[in-house]
Amino acid sequence: MGQILFPNTMIWGVAKIFVLFGMAIYVVFGFVVVRQVKLMTDTLQLGFEGFIRLLSYVHLLFTIAVFIFALIIL
Amino acid sequence: MTDIFISQEKKPKEEMKENSPVEKEVKEMMGQTLPKKEFKSLIASYLRNPKGVDFEIKDKQEKIELLLRQHPITNLRWIILGTIMIFAPIVLKQFPIFDFLPSNYRFIVYLGWYLITGSFILENFLTWYFNVYIITDERIIDVDFYNLIYKDISQADADKIQDVNYQMGGVVRTIFNYGDVFIQTAAEKPNFEFLAVPKPDKVVKVLQDLIQEEKQEAIEGRIR
């Protein structure tokens, strides 16, 4: 079905570039979230800074992992 | 002999009874004193005399009277939306929407979806958690974080507070006991709005006590 609709493999190559570009932007967003959390925890210490920072780092790692995964399997 | 033992056991019980109303009040007002205190204080939105709380413009002698954030029920919308987003791929699997995609692309689409879902939940939680209103023994502070990296911290000294009132209307607000507190000041920022905060009546009471205390300090010449 996919081959009938998209006979040219070039299309998937272009799609891969778009997906990777989107993922790369998302990795940048992941870094922004980490920076944002640092700004927030520096401004306010509410007792759960470690946990909140951990969440932001997990989010960043997830974005990087998805980017690398997309790079490998696409 | 046994009577002595009984009386000794009764004494602490009586003490506990004496303390129990205080404990109840403290438990009601301070999330962190309840069992599972860590989780409770993580999601608490009304913290009286919170411990371990600090902010960058706090003076050394300053004491935090009240820490407020929006009532947890205000998070319901994004929590429901986040839950729908989590289960959406499972439901959508029943419909062949992405069948035209090769399996590896389909997998990345699902991963990307969960990435967006995770970010959505994290962003909403952070926005709620860090947008706080603080009442100290000297001033009121409104901490707002907009977008991703923009913050706005407004403050007014207690002696600049001119008028305090609150609004509470609607079914949900009445059931969950939360509302908006409006503070008019003679400071640079004339209006402070503590939106959707729990127990607005008690917040107003705390503010009134603070104003009274400041007036008393001014009369006695104890201004810091």
Image: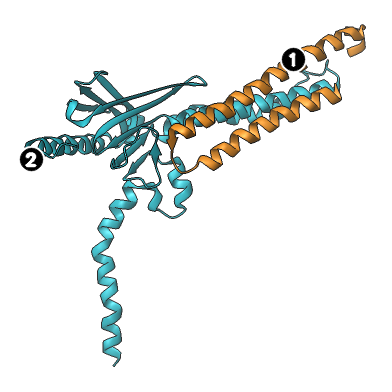
Chain colours: A orange, B cyan
Q: Which residue is mark 1?
A: A21
Residue B213 occupies quadrant: top left
Q: Which label was assigned to residue B176?
A: none
Visible residue check, residue B1: yes
Q: Label 1: state its secondary structure.
A: helix
> Pointer 1 indicates a residue of which chain?
A
Q: In terms of depth relative to the viewer, which is nearer, B80 or B123? A: B123
Dot 1: within a 10 Å radius of its alpha carbon, few (fewer than 14), some, or many (20 or more) residues?
few
Residue B138 x, y percent position in the rendering: 24, 35
B200 relative position to A16: left or right: left
Count how many numbered circles sit on residues in the image. 2
Residue at the farthest left position:
B219
Dot 2: within a 10 Å radius of its alpha carbon, few (fewer than 14), some, or many (20 or more) residues?
few
Locate the C terminus of chain B by quadrant: top left
Residue B154 x, y percent position in the rendering: 33, 24
Contact (Cβ within 8 Å) of mark 1 with mark 2: no
At 38% from the left and 53% from the top, the residue drawn is B33
Q: Amino acid at mark 1?
A: Phe
Is there one chain holding both mark 1 and mark 2? no
At 31% from the left and 37% from the top, the residue drawn is B59
At 71% from the left and 16% from the top, the residue drawn is A22
Residue B168 x, y percent position in the rendering: 27, 28
- Tell me: residue A74, above or below residue A37: above
Q: Amino acid at mark 2?
A: Glu
> Pointer 2 indicates a residue of which chain?
B
Q: Label 2: state its secondary structure.
A: helix
B126 relative position to B19: left or right: right
- Tell me: residue B133, above or below residue A19: below
Residue A20 x, y percent position in the rendering: 77, 17
Q: Which residue is mark 2?
A: B220
Q: In terms of depth relative to the viewer, which is nearer, B222 or B193? A: B222
